[in-house]
Amino acid sequence: MTVHIRPLSIEDLPDVAGRLRAEFPSDAADERNIARQVWGDPHYEPMHNLGAWDDDGLLRGVLLGVVRSSRAWIKALTVGPEPSVPEALLESFESVLAGSLVVVIDVSGSSPVYLTPGIDPCDTRSTLFFTSHGFRKVGEAYNMVCDLTHQPLDTADAEQALTAAGYRLARLTADDQLALTEFVDRRFSANWTAEALDALHQRPHTCHVAWFDGRIVGFAAAEVTNPGWFGPMGTHARHRKHGIGRVLLLRCLADLRDRGYREATIGWVGPMGFYQRACQARVSRLFWQYRKHLAPPHDPMA
């Protein structure tokens, strides 16, 4: 099949979303989220987000990508039944990266803006495609799911105990941006900061914080990576074991329930046992993470 590769435009959004929904029915591929994934990414570049059209003008494949510093990510690549289509998309993407500072391509997990933390191993076409094109499996990630329909989410008693211990729990405000940034950047990562601050675009803000002695010592956010997802969350090491994380989690889950969700996805889980104890969450999906190392650019002066 002959295909023509060009950068995606916003006019392509309905076709792109439809293609992604057909390829990844379990993922959040609605038009609003896809627009955020592509044109809303702070590192968006047109040549990193590509479509493949046939001679009849039908969209046959999509590659969503991004470059952050010396690393590139493929957020999504529709493999489909015709291997020449994803091969043409990958070749075009890698040709754009040639001669740049990029030395690694990761598949999925392009925090702070990403669709999934990896490839679902049940997606046999994708796993075989990547392994046959120079990518190797470098890790695994998990999602968990929490039922919100019968989940007790009241935190009044726990918050009263935390208040007595000197803590203050509150919803994040615009005035808290600097304090949150200082805390999350230092204790966790700048990517988590960017994700958490995205909660300020929600109404009400879907990030909650714990204060102690005038400083933020814990935070949790929801609805900032994908629709209906919880995370990221973190508590200062010296303030753990007081129940702060559980209260922040339940506050966020209540936000998601108020938005009409019947269940919450806890994405890219770290402490699995914590979530099982705190909200009876269970593992819902497994992801395989793939990476490809590119040859360093040729230096004619070397």
Image (tube, helix red, strand yellow):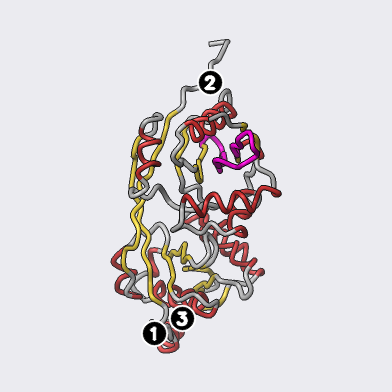
- Residue in the picture at 53% in, 20% down: 297
Q: Give me the C-alpha separation between circle 3 and circle 1.
A: 25 Å
Q: Bin the neighbour count of mark 1 within 10 Å (Cα to Cα): few under 14, some 14-19, many 20 and up.
A: few
Tag 1: amino acid: Pro
Q: Bin the neighbour count of mark 2 within 10 Å (Cα to Cα): few under 14, some 14-19, many 20 and up.
A: few
Camera-side mark, 3 or 2:
2
Query: What secondary structure is marked by label 3?
Result: loop
Camera-side mark, 3 or 1:
1
14 over 61 or under it: above or below: below
Residue 62 x, y percent position in the rendering = 55, 42
Query: What secondary structure is marked by label 1?
Result: loop
Residue 159 x, y percent position in the rendering = 44, 84
Residue 194 x, y percent position in the rendering = 57, 56
- Residue in the picture at 52% in, 72% down: 209
Q: Earlier in the sequence, mark 3 or mark 1?
A: 1
Circle count: 3
Q: Earlier in the sequence, mark 2 or mark 1?
A: 1
190 over 53 or under it: above or below: below
173 over 108 or under it: above or below: below
Is residue 170 left or right of 56 when viewed as pictured? Answer: left
Q: Which residues are magenta?
A: 50-71
Which residue carries the number 3 mark?
166
Which residue carries the number 2 mark?
297
**Numbered label attached to residue 152:** 1
Is residue 80 left or right of 96 when viewed as pictured? Answer: left
Tag 3: amino acid: Gly
Tag 2: amino acid: Pro
Q: Earlier in the sequence, mark 3 or mark 2?
A: 3
Residue 13 x, y percent position in the rendering = 65, 51
Query: What secondary structure is marked by label 2?
Result: loop
Residue 270 colored in magenta in the image: no
